[in-house]
């Protein structure tokens, strides 16, 4: 059976929902497919805020926001895209307010704003209050607000439909073909459903689950990125993966940067605010890549708490009122998961794998591009963490992801509505689902084989230890060999559940395949980038090298299975690269 829509959105996080809303408003016959119930998407876990230069608390301008985004991204940001982000941040946040999002308020009733890492006034003079927030559950409020709007506008949802393949017309996507739909695995009963459409948006979130310690939900396995890659679309800037400085020790659950935005300190074993050694001006509000490296340096120098591999986040001096009104959830996480009372005790933290700066390359209209000339793939779009526009470059600033969802989710929906005009129904094969059916049945049918839990753990360990905050050629080559070994063993993966009803065992095995694709390209891109920039920190190449590496990497899969790397220039419109001092 083939179901027809004019536009499909894969993913019901902030990016997918805003795109769906635009499509519905434009009267397009469209639908959203999501493997999770929409309000379980990871956007709902976002805590600290969404930035826009509203200037409600102090003077601010979108140009300052644009500059901070570019400098924060270590000048790998495409500056035309950063301009779009900073300008449209303002109108999208106000649009959300009008949709009913319950932001915290200033005494005179405007949206309240707080400080966040790397956001400054007047091109770096000092911190500025730019992050708009709803306590420390901003993402939850955005997700609920957008979902309600989608229901109000009659958006059609295919809930718990796990997209397992893209359907194409006229050849592969890397070679001139167009996206013409998707194949989805209906989780309730194991049916494969083919959906045809003139436009497909991939908004499936990130892939933090390839690391051992991560803030990311179990569902964040890089599905959209891997599916596009398997059809010839390059993965862009995969070497840039962000570690957030403040995760709960061992388990990685996030304690938002909002804690530092409100004035929290980071302390070493001597009770010293060690950021003074690394970023004397912005201190704890330096960008995340710098703070995470600083924590590792302190630990290496033996100044971790009791010589161990963590430091303290201290919010005691903020007082009960600020903590309860502005940081209620994260302080509860510390109580529940660590047994620590933040009102009276410092909280042990360590960096946690958090955010993919890389992903599917797009232009500023969310159209996917397939080469260094930015040739558009007809019918295919990407937005949110899945996409690489690139507004985050080598390192994303806090609160810049939620605004990326809003700005480019909205653009994606509008662009899709425009592009499908005049496009006929794609011609697709009746057996479009057969290839993926074979792959899935092979896993289900294997009587005995490799256990996915073991493979996942080995992957997470090697990525954490050898492709984490600090990297060397030796470690990366070890990671490359290990991922290759795991890929070989994955070909023989088997699952215990052979059934068709809600078989998450089977889908997790499938997701492991996506993680392997992402890990393999990440490691290849890391090995090739012989410099340190933003979140990519090579101990053997500690300097930034603008002469050779001021460019985006594009990883594609060659016919022989080898990964090919190409590079394309960064778009620079206003700000020439400078040393990054905070
Ligand atoms: C704990 C935490 C706190 C954060 N706090 C902040 C913050 O304060 N400010 C900020 O700017 N950013 C923050 N971030 C980052 C930000 O929340 C994410 O980058 C962003 O929410 C991603 O949104 P998205 O729409 O791209 O995808 P997600 O919200 O991750 O949604 C992905 C969607 O894709 C669907 N999906 C995935 N695979 C498939 C498939 N195969 N088939 C069908 N559907 C699929 C899922 O069902 C889901 O609906 C935080 C992230 C985390 C993890």
Image: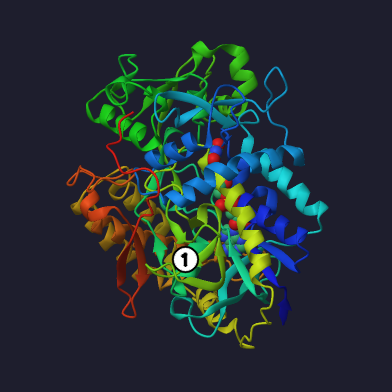
With respect to residue 480, does 469 lie above or below?
above
Q: Quadrant of residue 479?
A: bottom left
Crowding around mark 1 (Cα neighbors within 10 Å: few <14, some 14 to 19, many 20+) is many
Location of residue 532 in the rendering, given as x and y in whole percent from the top left corner = 25, 45
With respect to residue 140, does 376 lie above or below?
below
Which residue is painted at 65% across and 63% down in the image?
9
Asked whether, in this view, residue 60 is left or right of residue 482, the answer is: right
With respect to residue 345, does 371 lie above or below?
below
**How many discs appear?**
1
Which residue is painted at 34% across and 80% down in the image?
559
Which of the pair 577/499 is nearer the observer? Answer: 577
Q: Quadrant of residue 302?
A: top left
With respect to residue 417, does 59 lie above or below?
above
Return the residue at label 1. Answer: 226
The reply to whether residue 516 is visible in this rendering is no
Location of residue 471 in the rendering, given as x and y in whole percent from the top left corner = 25, 47
Which of the pair 292/307 is nearer the observer? Answer: 292
The reply to whether residue 244 is visible in this rendering is yes
Mark 1: which secondary structure?
helix
Location of residue 354 in the rendering, given as x and y in whole percent from the top left corner = 45, 43
Which of the pair 310/136 is nearer the observer? Answer: 136
Location of residue 339 in the rendering, given as x and y in whole percent from the top left corner = 52, 24
Q: Quadrant of the C terminus?
A: top left
Asked whether, in this view, residue 538 is left or right of residue 402, the answer is: left
């Amino acid at each position: 059976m083939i179901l027809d829509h004019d536009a499909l959105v894969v993913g019901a996080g902030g990016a997918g929902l805003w795109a769906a809303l635009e499509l519905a408003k434009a009267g397009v016959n469209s639908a959203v497919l999501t493997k999770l119930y929409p309000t379980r998407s990871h956007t709902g876990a976002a805590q600290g805020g969404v930035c826009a230069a509203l200037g409600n608390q102090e003077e601010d301008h979108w140009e300052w926001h644009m500059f901070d985004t570019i400098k924060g991204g270590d000048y790998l940001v495409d500056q035309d895209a950063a301009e779009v982000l900073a300008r449209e941040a303002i109108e999208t946040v106000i649009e959300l307010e009008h949709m009913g999002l319950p932001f915290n308020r200033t005494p005179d009733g405007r949206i309240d704003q707080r400080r966040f890492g790397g956001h400054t006034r007047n091109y770096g003079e000092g911190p500025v209050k730019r992050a708009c927030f709803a306590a420390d559950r901003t993402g939850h409020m955005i997700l609920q607000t957008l979902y309600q709007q989608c229901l109000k506008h009659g958006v059609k949802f295919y809930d718990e439909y796990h997209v397992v393949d893209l359907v194409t017309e006229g050849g592969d996507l890397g070679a001139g073909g167009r996206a013409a739909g998707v194949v989805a695995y209906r989780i309730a009963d194991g049916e494969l459903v083919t959906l045809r459409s003139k436009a497909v948006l991939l908004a499936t979130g990130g892939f933090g689950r390839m690391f051992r310690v991560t803030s990311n939900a179990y569902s964040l396995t890089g599905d959209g990125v891997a599916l596009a890659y398997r059809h010839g679309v390059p993965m862009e800037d995969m070497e840039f993966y962000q570690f957030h400085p403040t995760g709960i020790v061992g388990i990685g659950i996030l304690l938002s940067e909002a804690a530092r935005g409100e004035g929290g300190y980071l302390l070493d074993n001597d009770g010293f605010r060690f950021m003074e050694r690394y970023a004397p001006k912005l201190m704890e509000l330096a960008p995340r890549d710098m703070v995470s490296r600083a924590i590792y340096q302190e630990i290496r120098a033996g100044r971790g708490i009791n010589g161990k591999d963590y430091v303290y986040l201290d919010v005691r001096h903020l007082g009960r009122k600020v903590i309860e009104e502005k940081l209620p959830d994260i302080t509860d996480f510390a109580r529940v998961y660590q047994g620590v009372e933040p009102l009276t005790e410092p909280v042990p933290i360590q960096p946690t794998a958090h955010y993919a700066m890389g992903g599917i390359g797009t232009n500023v209209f969310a159209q996917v591009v397939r080469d260094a000339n930015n040739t558009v793939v007809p019918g295919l779009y990407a937005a949110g963490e899945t996409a690489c526009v690139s507004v985050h470059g080598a390192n994303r600033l806090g609160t810049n992801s939620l605004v990326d969802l809003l700005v480019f989710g909205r653009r994606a929906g509008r662009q899709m509505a425009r592009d499908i005009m005049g496009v006929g129904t794609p011609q697709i094969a009746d057996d479009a689902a057969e290839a993926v059916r074979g792959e899935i049945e092979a896993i289900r049918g294997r009587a005995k084989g490799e256990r996915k839990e073991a493979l996942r753990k080995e992957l997470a360990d090697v990525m954490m230890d050898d492709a984490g905050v600090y990297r060397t050629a030796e470690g990366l080559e070890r990671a490359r060999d290990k991922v290759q070994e795991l890929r070989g063993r994955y070909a023989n993966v088997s699952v215990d559940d052979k059934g068709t009803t809600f078989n998450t065992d089977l889908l997790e095995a499938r997701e492991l395949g996506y993680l392997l694709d992402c890990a393999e390209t990440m490691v290849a891109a890391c090995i090739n980038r012989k410099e340190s920039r933003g979140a990519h920190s090579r101990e053997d190449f500690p300097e930034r090298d603008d002469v050779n590496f001021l460019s985006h990497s594009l990883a594609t899969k060659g016919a022989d299975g080898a990964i090919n790397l190409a590079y394309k220039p960064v778009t620079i419109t206003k700000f020439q690269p400078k040393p990054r001092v905070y």
